[in-house]
Each structure stands twice: as structure tokens, then as C-alpha cells.
Image (cartoon, rainbow, N blue to C red):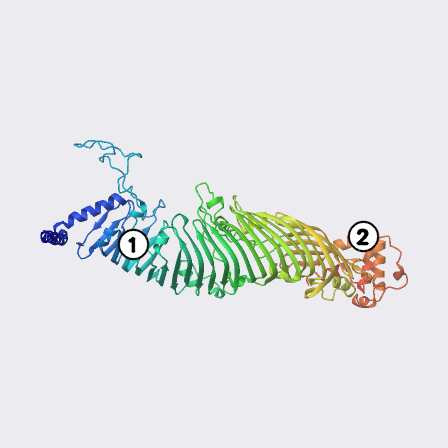
Amino acid sequence: MLKRILIVIAVLVVLAIAAVIAIPFLVPKDQVKALVTEEVHQATGRTLVLGGDLDVQLFPVLAVTVDEAAISNPPGMEGDLAQVTELIVELDWMSLLSRELRIQKFVLDRPQIALQVGADGRGNWEFEPPASTPGTPAAGTAAEGRPAEPAPSDTAPAPAEDMADGPDRELRELQLSGVEIRKGQVTYTDAAGESHRLEDLDLTLDMPGLAQPLDLSGKARVDGTDLAFEGRMGELRGLMQGDKVATRLALSSEPATLVLDGQLAAGAAQSFDGDIQLAVPSVPALLALAGQDAAAVPPSLANVDLKGRLSAVPQKLGLSGMTLALGEVTLTGDIVVEPQGDRPRIAADLKTGMLDLNAILPQGGAAAQPEAAPADAAGTAPQTQGGTPAPQASQPAPAAPGGGAAWPDTPIDVSALSMLDLDLSLVADGLRYRKFEASGLEFSVALRDRNLSADLSRLALYGGKGSAQVNVNARGGAPQFAVTADLDGIQAEPVLATLADFDRLAGTGNAKAALTSSGGTVRQAVANLAGNGAILFRDGAIKGINIGQILRSIGSGFQQPFYGPEQATDFSELSGSYSISGGVLTNRDLSMKSPLLRMDGAGTVSIIGKTVDYRAEPELVATAAGQGGADELDGLTVPLLIRGPLEDPAITPDIQGMTENFLKDPDAAIRQLKGLRQNLPGQLQQLLGNGAAPTGDAAQGASPTENPREAVEDAVKGVLGGGKNPGDALRGILNR
């Protein structure tokens, strides 16, 4: 009996083996191809083309080899999503009986994957099952020749296998061996037609089991640049169960290397938390790889190094304990990035030593201006996102009234304000930009929906300190600007020379300003400039002119030089306030005091026209009482007119104004002119000319003549020394 049973079993085994060997030859390959392509179409809505041979082997392992396979793009896109020259899959099919999947070989030979984004923003890798056709009977509808099938019900009992306990249906084991991609190629093309290419991809992957680490390595060329990569991930079983697993990924290429080492979680709680190291030895090479122009990168920014702790969850990326080296500048702190629609939000709290912007920002000539965007049929300039006018190409600006080039029509490009929302806090030991240097910088920026507010709460510069606030609002049509500033105890000469290329004022001063403007171009912004402010400088000098020398030269026929780079007017105090409207500054209360001079002034400075029209009234003090002395001291007053281009104004005496001042009180003018030379210190008497000093009645003050103008002119002639016509003498300085 037992012998018969063994014979039956042996026959069954032989028949089973024969069946396994014979099945691949008995099942038509075309039928298998048709079945596979139909299933793919039902699942994805795409067409699978199996153009080459299909080889199926069941013994000793389940092996499938496919030649020349391709899967199509969605309707509306040309070409295929993917093509492969050869696909080889080998697995131990006996392991499936124990719910174990052991893949012994998986090879993709020369796969070509073309990823595209269509005009509707959808990618060709997004699959959708095909919709039911009119000839397809819906559930619950009777097909011809068959009774209606009942529609599925939420309360219908599930199949027995679906009611089985979850753990009994889980895949117990997964083994991946011999996984390879050979000479692969991947291209990505966005909706604008810009594309990137990854080619010559060679990849190997190995995972002994679900409880064992997964290792991968490979190399490729990305847009013509060689890239090598390797990685290891902890047990896949834990990742599938929502646990965090140790993960390390390293990418290396000539322009950059990246290492991520931390804990990775998948599923609903997907996240990464670990260390990041990024080294960019060649910033221009990396920008070129990304398709960006690297010509403007300064040589000092040749490398970038980043280290820190990276925390990433969906819709949020954080970098803490960061050290970022940008060339010679090192920043430390924390950064958080939150993608939110079209405008991500970035929050950063940073610290640095000397913030040398010369080493970070591009230097040299002005950047090329964008071409003018065409207006619409109504002549309206195109708008960027958020309603901000698109930058227009600048037109040649006409000459300024004061000579030289007028303010240009260069567009003020504020489109960057619509790119993100920003919260930035920066503390720096110092700031350097071109020739400007400052120390003790505390700076914060808040950018919300194209409205930027910057607060410079602390700034130490050139012996003093200051603060400033800036607002740029690009929410409407033309951008709007507002600036307030408060400077205390600064050295005026280096600040003005650095910021305004103006080196004619020296001294320690305080300044306040509150300015507003608006406009889409530089010229419009200057023309709309408005506001007010005040200045107070002490112990300084106005360079380029010696106002005291003008007065002292009266006695020598104006033969002494008073105007030029070597001349200066010293002062102990200089103060005034101003208002600005329509790009024109108006001052009515300029006051300067020095030991030998008093000066008041009033006039306008056309910032938009780059001209000045100003009248100053310097008064030579007959004593050296100095600052804080008696303002009622009588002295000689020679009004000065400062007119012309800001770059090189003409400074001349106001002859008519001086005569009118004298004629207001002819008797006092005669006594003043005759007595001034006698009463001044001997050193100034020598500077006032070679004529003999008045004596006798002239020294005591002669009786006024019946003609006041003649008396004034006679007195002026006496001071001039030798009867020189006062008009000719004063006009003699006009051409100096």
C-alpha cells in the first residue's frame, strides 16, 4: 500500500515538473502580450507597446525577459513616457507560497524616461484610468445575453481574503539582489520648454531583507556634469511601519558635494531630521549647471560651505545651528522655509562678523536693462504678478538743467518683492559696501505681500551712531517709498563722500530726515521726492570756498584767492532745516557761526534738476567772540550767490544785494566801512589791503553826505585802497 502511494506521488511530481516546463511553450506569447497591455491600459489609461520578444520561464526560477518595450504619453503629448531596450526580472516563485518575495535579478537596460509638464500644469507621469465608454455596461445594468450584476454595496460582505487579519496577509520578506539600471537616461521639460538631462545612469541596489539595510550606488551625467552618488537606509520594514530609520545619502560632483545623514520617516508622518553638509567649490560652475548666468559672480565668492541641522516635514524646511560661509563672509543662525502657494515664506535669524557685501554682491558696471515689454492696445504697460508694473527699458535721458546727464528713466524693478514673504533678523559686527563702512549693525526686514519694511535699529559709523527705517510698498501700480533716518555724532565728510560722492562738508553732526516718494523709474522717484529734515554740525568746514577770505580781500582789490580745492570756511556750528517737494529742497534758516564769521542763508536745491539757487549772507565779526558770542556785533556783510549745477556751482558776491544792505542805513555803512579796518586786529588789517588806514574824521565817522549812494561808494573806495570802483572790484571775482 505504501509503495503504491509513493508511486502515485512520484508520478504527480513528474507531471508537475513536466507541466512547469511545458506551460511556457503551450501558452501563446501574443496572448500574454495582449493580456499584459490590456491590464496596463485599464490601470493607467496608457498604451503599453511590447515590440520585441517576450520570454517567460518558470523553472528553476520565474524569469521574464522583455525586449523593446514602451509606454505612451497621455493624449496631447507627443512621444513616449518611457522606453526600455531590455527588461529582465528573475524571482524565486516558490518563495511566494510563504508570502516572501525574493528578486534575484532585475535589470533595466538603456531605459529612456522623458518627464514633461503640459500646458495645463500636469505631468505626464500622473496616471488616470480610462473613463467608461458608452458601450461598457455600468454596474447593476444587464449586458446583452447576461442577467444584471448587482451593484456593489458598502454593506456587502467582503471576500474572505479581504477579511483576513492584516498581519497574516503582510509580505513577510523582501529580498532585492542584482538590481541594476544600465545606461539610463532621464529628461525633464517644464511647461516653458526648459529642459534638463540626466544620462549615462548606472545604478546598483541591494537589500538582503526587510530587516537589513538597503544600499545603493551609481553615477550619471547631469546636463553634461559627472555626478556620483551612494546611500544607505536602515531596515525597510521599520520605514513601512512609520518608524524613523537611519538614512545617509552622499552626492558628489565637480561643482558641489552634498551629504545628508539623519533619520527618515515615511507615510503620514514623513520627515527627515539630520545633519547636512554642502560644499560648493565653484559657484559659477554650479550656476552654469542650473542654467543660470554666472558671469556676474565676483571672484571672492568662489566657494560656499554650509553645515547645520536639517529638519524637513511636508510644507516646512528648517535649518538650525547653521554655519554658512559665502566666500570671506560667514553667517550663523537658523532659517525656516515654508512653501505656501506661489509665494513661500522664509524666516531667518542670523549673525555675522564683518558683513563685506563687496565680497558677495556683483561689482562693476550697471546691469543690463531688460527690453521694453510691449504695451497692449490701449497703451497700458504690462503688469507683473500682484499688479506691479513690469520694468520698461530705459530711454536716453535729456540733459539736466544744471548740465550733465539728467536722472535716467531706468525702471525700478520691485518684482522680487512678489517672490516670497520674509522675516529676517541680522546682527553684524560691521558692514562694508564699496567705500562705506559701519559697525555694530542690527537689522530686521519684514516682507508681506509685496510690502517691505526694514528697520536699522542700531548702526555705529564714523564716530557716531544712527538708525533708519525703510518701507517699499509694491502692492499698487507704481511702487511707493518711505525713509526715516536719525544720525547722531557722525563725521560728515566720510559719510557724504561715501554715500553721495560729496566731499565739501566736514564736521561732527546730527541729521534727521523723513522722506517719501513714488514712481516706476528713477527719474519719477526723484521728481516725486518729498519730506523734511534738519542738520546740525559742529567744528567743521565748508570746503572749496573761503568766505572769510572774500571779506578780507576787499582791502586788496580781491587779489587774494578764496575759491578752489585748497580753500575752506571753518565753522564752529552749522545748522538748518529743510523741506522737499517735487524733488526740490528748500531751506530758509541756514545759520553758521565761527570765531570771525556769522552767516545766514536761504534758497533751493533742485534735486531733480541737479541745480542750486542759494543766497548766503556772511558777516565778518569785528571781534573773536566766537560761537555763543553776541549776535548783535556789527560787521561787514557781503551776500554771496551760489548758483548753477550741483557738481560745480558758481559762487559770486551779490553786488546789488550788498549795495542795498548798505543803503538801508548809509550813515552806519560809512562808519562801518571806515572803522572796520581801524578796529580789526593788526593781522586782519594787513589782509585788507595796502591802502592807508582812515584817520581823523574818517576814523571817527564823517558826516553823511546829501547823496547816500555817493557816500557809500566813497567809503567803499576808501576801504578798497586807492579809489578803485567798487563795482569793478567786486565783479573782478566773477570770473575766478
Tag 1 near tag 2, CB within 8 Å: no
Type of amino acid at the residue the image marks with label 1: Glu
Front of the two marks 1 and 2: 1
Q: Is residue 711 visible?
A: no
Q: Residues within 10 Å of mark 1 (few under 14, many from 20)?
A: some
Q: With 715 as the anchor, is 360 left or right in this view? A: left
Q: Residues within 10 Å of mark 2 (few under 14, many from 20)?
A: some
Q: Is residue 679 left or right of residue 390?
A: right
Q: Camera-side residue: 701 or 541?
A: 541
Where does residue 157 sit, x and y in percent of width and height? 28, 36
Q: Considering the image in quadrants, where does the C terminus appear?
A: bottom right
**Cα separation between marks 1 and 2:** 113 Å
Write the residue at 22% across / 53% down.
69
Q: Quadrant of residue 735?
A: bottom right
Residue 148 vs 58, above or below: the answer is above
Give the residue at mark 1.
Answer: 173
Residue 339 rendering spot, x and y as whole percentages = 45, 49
- Residue type pointed to by label 2: Leu
Q: What residue appears at the point 58 percent right and 63 percent down from the top-left corner?
A: 435
Instruction: Estimate the x, y position of residue 197 in percent, counting from the top left.
Output: 33, 57
Q: In which image quadrant can residue 244 be found?
A: bottom left
* Of callouts 1 and 2, the N-terminal one: 1
Q: Is residue 591 visible?
A: yes
Which residue is nearer to you in this view: 352 or 551?
A: 352
Query: Which residue is labeled 2 in the image?
Result: 663
Residue at 77% from the left image edge and 66% from the top image edge: 556
Secondary element under disc 2, as helix, strand or loop, is helix
Q: Nearer the viewer, residue 568 or 207?
A: 207
